[in-house]
Image: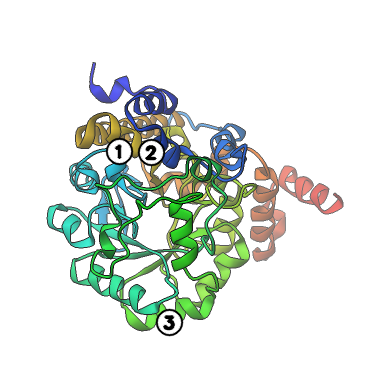
Amino acid sequence: MSTSRRLIKLSELEQQAKSLLDPKAYDFIAGGAGEDEWAVKNNKKAFLRYHLIPRVLQDIHEVSTSTNLFGKQIAAPIILGPCAFHKLASPKGELATAQAAAEAKTIMTLSTMSSYSIEEVAKVSKSPKWFQLYIFKNRAITEKLVKRAEEAGYCALVVTVDVPVMGMRMRDINNKFSLPPDIDAANFREIGLSALSAKTHGSKIKEHTDQQFDSSLNWHTIDWLHSITNLPIILKGILNADDALEALKHNISGIVISNHGGRQLENAAAPIDVLPIIAQVIQNRIPLLIDGGFNRGKDIFKAIALGADAVMVARYFMWALAIGGEEKVISMFKKLHEELIHTMLLAGCASLEIIKKRGLSLLTGPGIIDLKLTALENKLNQLSEPSNFSPHVRNSLWLRSKL
């Protein structure tokens, strides 16, 4: 049996990694906001609220999962999302992750808080790469990071907008978490901000974040960012449809629907739950990405049907990295890819385009019926002859108007 087929559940993969990792490093990767980490748990549970409605007799000879994001073709709608300090999981850290991304024919997103630098990762990377950016109080630091990413060949900026301050990550606070002496924030060595191993009363990472990151970000900040770069700007951390619409006004190239893996606002909604309404207001004008608890191919299918163009995975590949480095990350990706293909076959969808076209008709779940009726109502309003709708549809719309 292949290595990828032995990775049955995320929980099993996580437990293997936990047995190998330093306990404080494990807590840093696994932990969420608040004492009970409700958002982390809810991200995983949210997928259980959506159920597939397959099509049959679809004459499928082969399945295509390939997709194009910002001019880059990737093998599947699965991207390695940003995660800090990969060296906590493996000595090769982000170098191994970049090499795995190339083998998997996908995109890697390098964190601002990486343990190998922008340039070090670029040297070994042979696939498209994005750079995740935090906005610093000192704008010169931010601008320098952007220029370095441009010069090193990164093809998009993923700007995190949901960290005005660090969430209350109780595990890190209670552990007084700081980096081991042999790991630092590699992108800040030149300016003397890389060492995060000093003793602290709480989390050293939180202390650094609250000191350095700008909590007063606004839409003018995004306009300023456009003024210093021509790279596509993707906003990560959108959960509210009003913010998604506002992003369009500021020439944003894409959105990542995210609650930061449950690590920021303790009671933040699960991204999968807000995806349908954001997709409805965006109307395919820009790519929609999503993260938050993805560890099965069927969940990726659900996200595509609900309107996403691709998903980001972070914790899952960090567990794989801890267990077996680059090869295990490749196995993790293959497993997700195989499961997605299997789900597509069983659901009667030969391509991602077909999933998106059929959309909500493939699902049932929270609010889905209402969204379906809204879509039908919009079509009805556009027709000169509403009588073209079946009596069943007209009756459903009439009933909805009375609720």
Residue situated furthest right in the rendering? 402
Query: How many numbered circles are shown?
Result: 3
Sequence-first disc among 1 and 2: 2
What residue did someone put label 1 on? Answer: 89
Residue count near mark 3 (Cα–Cα under 10 Å), binned few <14, some 14–19, many ≥20: few
Q: Is residue 369 left or right of residue 98?
A: right
Visible in this render: residue 193? Answer: yes
Visible in this render: residue 61? Answer: no
> What's the amino acid at mark 1?
Ala
Q: Nearer the viewer, residue 27 or 369?
A: 27
Element on which disc 3 rests: helix
Element on which disc 1 rests: loop
Task: Check whether the beta carbons of the residues at disc 1 and disc 2 lie within 8 A of each other.
Answer: yes
> What's the amino acid at mark 2?
Ala
Where in the figure is residue 22, as x and y percent of width and height? 35, 33
Q: Is residue 23 left or right of residue 237?
A: left
Residue situated furthest top in the rendering? 1
Inter-mark Cα distance, 1 to 2: 8 Å
Residue count near mark 1 (Cα–Cα under 10 Å), binned few <14, some 14–19, many ≥20: many
Q: Nearer the viewer, mark 3 or mark 2?
A: 2
Answer with the quarter of the image where residue 42 lies. Answer: top right
What residue did someone put label 2 on? Answer: 25
Q: Nearer the viewer, residue 399 or 40?
A: 40
Q: Which mark is residue 224?
A: 3
> What's the amino acid at mark 3?
Trp
Residue count near mark 2 (Cα–Cα under 10 Å), binned few <14, some 14–19, many ≥20: many
Where in the figure is residue 135, as x and y percent of width and height? 42, 70
Where in the figure is residue 236, as x and y percent of width and height? 46, 59
Where in the figure is residue 52, as x and y percent of width and height? 54, 33
